[in-house]
Image (tube, grey):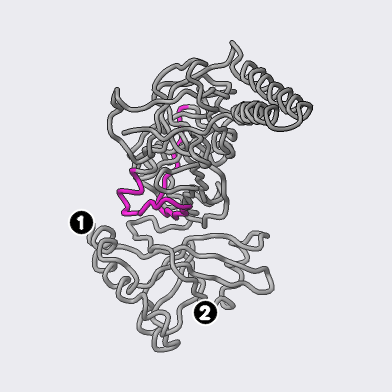
């Protein structure tokens, strides 16, 4: 593979202008005014001399030079000796590492490349470009041994958080994981066109590192960066999950200015509040299934249980809870007509109307035949004057066959 020719340094262009002016001065001397020719000659020499001075500065003895070949991010072939390499100035504080991915100038745009060895000023071709993703990486210089560590374990099963993904944070060091990002996209059948891309991934995983302050981010069991802005509370929850052999399921948005080369990748993680990672108290003591999150559904009959709901709120405007769905006995059904009741912490708090309850009867009956309770996420809202309970659950008809086999039939 032959590398593309890099852009010449800015200082090269006055040299050509100076040479052109010198030639024109000779022509003017022969056919026109000698004074004008002399001025043009002096100006040309000044440009040539200025260029030499600028090149001398740019090639100062303390500059670090590296040789790199142009490579697409998804090109995983071995490097060959006959591939054309170009020399660039290394502008960063941390020392260059052979095999590292860098961003290089090429014909008015930027391209990915790989460092293949040291270079010298004799074959200097341009500066490695300090793109945003690299410049934002200053924490690496300060503490590389703590802020960029792999997860304690790569293949942690993902535990879905109880609460919604309301927090966002940028992932640091994504440019160090180009291969992993390209591989993850390939595994998911995501096309990477030579244009800006934005990909939404809903099953990324957060896991603690040995340092615990900077959680690692994973996609399909591959480490793709770290969160530098987090809290001790979230770190504690991640450690608790890791002790159970689990990671935290989170959302992730991947964007890049050039998908085919994964240029300037940016990752944004969506995660829950620390106190909404774990399930709240009130789940049944025996075996149960937890329905996946779904559309919100208001229950009925809360006014008959206002005291219990006010106790759950405990002065706050809302509280996330676990609700249990159960079939009402025949007497209750004859009196009120609904078929599905709702309990929180073992206490009844209302019921579903006939139409709404019909969506849950099949899954409740299937689980009851196997001694399993049915639970879902719920939200208690209000105050001592008016309280509401909202379920956040998928209906029976929305459950996948895989989910039913795994959770109900335990296969």
Instruction: Measure the alpha-carbon separation of dots 2 and 1.
Output: 35 Å
Q: Which residue lies at the image location 34% right of the left edge and 33% below the top edge?
A: 2
Range of magenta residues: 183-210
Q: Which residue is mark 2?
A: 300
Q: Is residue 88 above or below residue 254?
A: above
Q: Which residue lies at the image location 47% right of the left edge and 49% below the top edge?
A: 254
Q: Which residue lies at the image location 64% right of the left edge and 18% below the top edge?
A: 52
Indicate left or right for 27 with 173 as reference. right
Residue 190 painted magenta: yes
Question: Circle 2 — which element?
Answer: loop
Q: Quadrant of residue 405?
A: bottom left
Question: Circle 1 — which element?
Answer: loop
Q: Which residue is mark 1?
A: 411
Q: Position of residue 362 (x, y in %)?
A: 30, 75
Indicate left or right for 57 with 379 as reference. right
Residue 199 painted magenta: yes
Between 182 and 327, the one nearer to me in the picture: 182
Q: Is residue 186 above or below residue 386?
A: above
Q: Position of residue 260 (x, y in %)?
A: 39, 47
- How packed mark 2 is, by other alpha carbons closer than 10 Å (few <14, some 14-19, many 20 or more), is some
């Amino acid at each position: 593979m032959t590398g593309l020719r890099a852009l010449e340094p800015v200082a090269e262009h006055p040299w050509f202008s100076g040479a052109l002016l010198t030639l024109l001065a000779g022509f003017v001397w022969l056919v026109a005014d000698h004074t004008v020719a002399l001025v043009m000659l002096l100006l040309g020499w000044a440009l040539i001399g200025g260029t030499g001075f600028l090149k001398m500065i740019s090639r100062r003895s303390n500059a670090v030079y590296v040789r790199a070949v142009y490579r697409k991010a998804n090109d995983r072939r071995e490097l060959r000796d006959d591939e054309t390499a170009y020399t660039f100035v290394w502008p960063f504080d941390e020392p260059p590492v052979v095999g590292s991915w860098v961003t290089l100038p090429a014909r008015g745009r930027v391209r990915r490349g790989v460092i293949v060895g040291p270079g010298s000023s004799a074959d200097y071709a341009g500066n490695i470009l300090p793109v945003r993703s690299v410049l934002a990486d200053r924490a690496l210089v300060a503490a590389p041994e703590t802020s960029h560590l792999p997860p304690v374990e790569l293949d942690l099963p993902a535990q879905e958080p109880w609460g919604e993904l309301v927090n966002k944070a940028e992932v640091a060091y994504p440019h160090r994981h180009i291969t992993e990002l390209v591989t993850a996209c390939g595994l998911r059948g995501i096309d990477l066109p030579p244009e800006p891309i934005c990909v939404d991934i809903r099953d990324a995983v957060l896991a603690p590192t040995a340092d615990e302050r900077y959680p690692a981010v994973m996609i399909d069991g591959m480490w793709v960066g770290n969160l530098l802005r987090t809290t001790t509370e979230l770190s504690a929850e991640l450690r608790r999950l890791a002790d159970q052999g689990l990671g935290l399921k989170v959302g992730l948005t991947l964007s890049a200015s050039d998908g085919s080369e994964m240029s300037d990748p940016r990752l944004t993680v969506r995660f829950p509040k620390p106190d909404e990672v774990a399930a709240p108290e009130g789940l049944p003591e025996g075996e149960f299934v937890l329905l996946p999150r779904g559309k919100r559904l208001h229950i009925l009959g809360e006014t008959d249980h206002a005291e219990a709901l006010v106790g759950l709120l405990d002065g706050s405007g809302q509280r996330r809870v676990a609700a249990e769905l159960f079939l009402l006995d025949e007497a209750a059904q004859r009196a009120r007509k609904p078929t599905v009741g709702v309990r929180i912490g073992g206490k009844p708090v209302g019921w579903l109307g006939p139409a709404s309850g019909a969506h849950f009867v099949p899954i409740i009956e299937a689980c009851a035949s196997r001694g399993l309770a049915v639970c879902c996420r719920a939200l208690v809202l209000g105050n001592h004057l008016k309280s509401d309970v909202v379920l956040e659950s998928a209906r029976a008809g929305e459950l996948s066959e895989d989910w039913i086999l795994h959770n109900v039939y335990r296969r």
